[in-house]
């Protein structure tokens, strides 16, 4: 399939992005193939406008100056609306948005405007617009950047205030295994994002490098499922225009040795299962054995949708076929990193282990492309210290279902409701109420001009290493929304949430050294991207000389760079149902 794509149809013009295949393992010159290490020809050429070393130096300087403001942001306890009933009256979300807006306004970025919107009944929304370089062709293109300012609850397990690394509001900066590390709730998820975008633009302006127009959006309801995002994006769509590229900076990375792109995100269905048996608590010695226990009824209902032995979800409405290219991505991640339960810093108790302790590939597929259920809230039973011999009248559970990309969250929610409420055991009163839902996301292909710029930036700042590709088991509703609103735009999902960042948990951490390189990559991408007008699909593309494509000064002239998304061959089977290690078309399922 790769060779067919490289050659093209018989008689067709030579494609501009030729593919070089490495020698087969075992032959002379063979070496391990890095994940999706495709080649883009024509990257060698004259130096361009961005000096890689100078760019990183300026970015680092600006980050050092911005750190006190980010630390002050961390010290604001602005929790997401879903967990703070008083968010509309206590003003903490607005205080956080105003704080970041004030910092943006003080940066002296040319052509920059900033405002905080707050429509009635909705959380605040930060909007930053930076004009493109006047007189540059890039000024007509818009890069839309996304982050969020609301935070998860603090939870337990943080280091004590006054000690290292400090509590959730500390904003402590200290040296650690990943260099300088900034601790506190909201540091990495996702307070750094607006700072990083503005710093990238400022670094380019200090170098006199042309950059596109930028629109930076930061919502305050992401951790609640982004219920207010759609309203603001629709309201701002005339100002946003048609973006060339959409960046989501709220994702993660497998390690800190390269720039990582997220290719897929799971969706979510969250709801409350309410099970009632009796009107009030009753003596278990008198009613036990006759009155069914409400918790047992709840366990029976959960077993309708999840195999209690394996954790596998049983409903077909929550399943999907896994695209072959994503299976290949998971396979290569497994080969490179091994079992994720050993590398991602999960806080295991002694003796505990994952459902599949030895299957690295299966663990990646389970986390990225298969559904799962978690009980995230429980009511109806007293604390252990206060519990007596009383049958509970009922129980309530908040259930979070992570659903794969390509699964419709509305159909999944309807299937769950039907299965839970149909024929309840012992005639119990059962009600399932859907509280929140969002679709997952599978990355579309991106334009070649962006492919070249992203690959070049990564290799410039990470010792020539190629881009990494991964997935995230969480949900970012914005991506599916923007893909529908702006179908022609490139969508890039990336971020700094890597090992030990511990977002949503105690001791959340922002790795500053990686964040500075990451920000330098964002700046370089905007500085070196060579935006070309689109070519009509019905007109053959002539051979072009790419020998003078821009390459940043001070960086290597990369000879091989990965594509952001492997191109499919028209007519080839898209899915391999069972064995990603067998070439598509060679197995009975694909035949």
Image: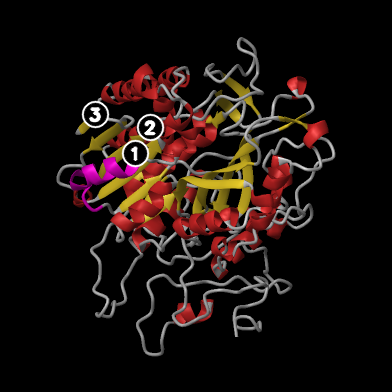
- The residue that appears at 52% across and 76% down in the rendered structure is 2
Q: Crowding near pointer 1: few (<14 within 10 Å), some, many (20+)?
A: some
Left or right relative to 61: residue 213: left
Comparing 590 with 163, the one in front is 590
- Residue sitting farthest toward the bottom: 10
From the image, give the main secondary structure of the stretch colored magenta: helix
Comparing 387 with 564, the one in front is 387
Q: Identify the residue under disc 3.
A: 115
The kind of secondary structure element at disc 3 is strand
Q: Identify the residue under disc 2.
A: 220
- The residue that appears at 26% across and 61% down in the rendered structure is 532
Give the image quarter of residue 113. top left
Circle on res. 228: 1
* Disc 1 + disc 2, Cβ < 8 Å: yes
Image quarter (top left, top right, bottom left or bottom right) of the C terminus: bottom right
Residue 580 image point, x, y percent: 65, 70
Residue span colored magenta? 228-242
Left or right relative to 88: residue 315: right
Between marks 3 and 1 in the image, the one whose residue lies nearer the viewer: 1
Which mark is first along the chain, 1 or 3?
Answer: 3
Total tally of numbered discs in the picture = 3
Residue 232 image point, x, y percent: 27, 40
Circle on res. 81: none
Residue 24 image point, x, y percent: 67, 74
Q: Is residue 175 on the magenta stretch?
A: no
Q: CA distance from mark 3 to mark 1?
A: 17 Å
Between marks 1 and 2 in the image, the one whose residue lies nearer the viewer: 1
Residue 209 makes an appearance in the image: no
* Disc 3 + disc 1, Cβ < 8 Å: no
């Amino acid at each position: 399939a790769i060779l067919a794509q490289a050659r093209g149809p018989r008689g067709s013009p030579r494609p501009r992005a030729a593919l070089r295949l490495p020698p087969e393992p075992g032959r002379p010159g063979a070496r391990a193939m890095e994940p999706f290490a495709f080649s883009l020809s024509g990257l060698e050429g004259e130096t361009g406008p961005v000096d890689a070393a100078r760019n990183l130096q300026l970015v680092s300087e600006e980050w050092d100056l911005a750190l006190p403001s980010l630390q002050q942001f961390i010290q604001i306890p602005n929790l997401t609306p879903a967990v703070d009933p008083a968010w509309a009256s206590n003003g903490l979300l607005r205080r956080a948005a105003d704080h970041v807006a004030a910092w943006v306004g003080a940066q002296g970025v040319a052509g920059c405007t900033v405002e905080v919107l707050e429509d009635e009944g909705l959380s605040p929304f930060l909007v930053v617009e930076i004009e493109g370089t006047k007189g540059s062709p890039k000024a007509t293109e818009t890069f839309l950047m996304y982050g969020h300012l609301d935070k998860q609850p603090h939870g337990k397990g943080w280091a004590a205030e006054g000690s290292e690394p400090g509590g959730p509001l500390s904003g402590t900066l200290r040296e650690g295994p990943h260099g300088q590390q900034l601790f506190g709730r909201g540091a990495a998820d996702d307070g750094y994002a607006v700072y990083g975008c503005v710093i990238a633009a400022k670094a380019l302006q200090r170098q006199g490098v042309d950059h596109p127009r930028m629109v930076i959006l930061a919502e305050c309801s992401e951790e609640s499922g982004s219920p207010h995002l759609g309203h603001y994006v629709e309201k701002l769509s005339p100002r946003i225009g048609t973006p060339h590229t959409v960046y989501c900076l709220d994702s993660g990375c497998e390690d800190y040795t390269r720039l990582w792109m997220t290719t897929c995100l799971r969706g979510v269905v969250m709801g409350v299962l309410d099970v009632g048996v009796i009107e009030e608590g009753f003596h278990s010695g008198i009613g036990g054995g006759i009155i069914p226990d409400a918790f047992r009824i709840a366990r029976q209902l959960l077993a309708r949708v999840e195999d209690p032995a394996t954790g596998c979800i049983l409903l077909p409405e929550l399943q999907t076929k896994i695209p072959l290219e994503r299976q290949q991505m998971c396979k290569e991640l497994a080969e490179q990193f091994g079992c994720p339960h050993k590398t991602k810093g999960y806080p295991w108790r002694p003796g505990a282990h994952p459902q599949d302790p030895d299957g690295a590939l299966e663990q990646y597929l389970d986390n990225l492309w298969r559904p799962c259920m978690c009980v995230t809230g429980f009511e109806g039973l007293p604390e252990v210290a206060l519990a007596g011999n009383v049958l509970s009248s009922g129980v309530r559970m908040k259930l979070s279902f992570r659903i794969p990309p390509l699964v419709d969250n509305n159909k999944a929610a309807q299937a769950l409701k039907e299965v839970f409420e149909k024929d309840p055991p012992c005639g119990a009163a059962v009600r399932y109420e859907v509280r929140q839902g969002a679709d997952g996301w599978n990355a579309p292909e991106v334009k070649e001009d962006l492919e070249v710029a992203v690959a070049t930036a990564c290799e410039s700042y990470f010792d020539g290493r190629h881009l990494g590709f991964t997935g995230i088991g969480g949900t970012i509703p914005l991506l599916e929304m923007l893909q529908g609103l702006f179908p022609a735009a490139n969508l890039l999902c990336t971020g700094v949430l890597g090992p030990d960042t511990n977002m949503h948990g105690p001791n959340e951490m922002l790795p500053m050294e990686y964040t500075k390189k990451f920000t330098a990559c964002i700046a370089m991408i905007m500085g070196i991207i060579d935006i070309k007008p689109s070519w009509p699909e019905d007109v053959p593309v002539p051979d072009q000389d790419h020998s003078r494509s821009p390459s940043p000064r001070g960086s290597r002239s990369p000879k091989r760079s990965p594509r952001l998304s492997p191109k499919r061959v028209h007519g080839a089977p898209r899915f391999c149902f069972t064995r990603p290690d067998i070439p598509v078309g060679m197995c009975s399922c694909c035949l």
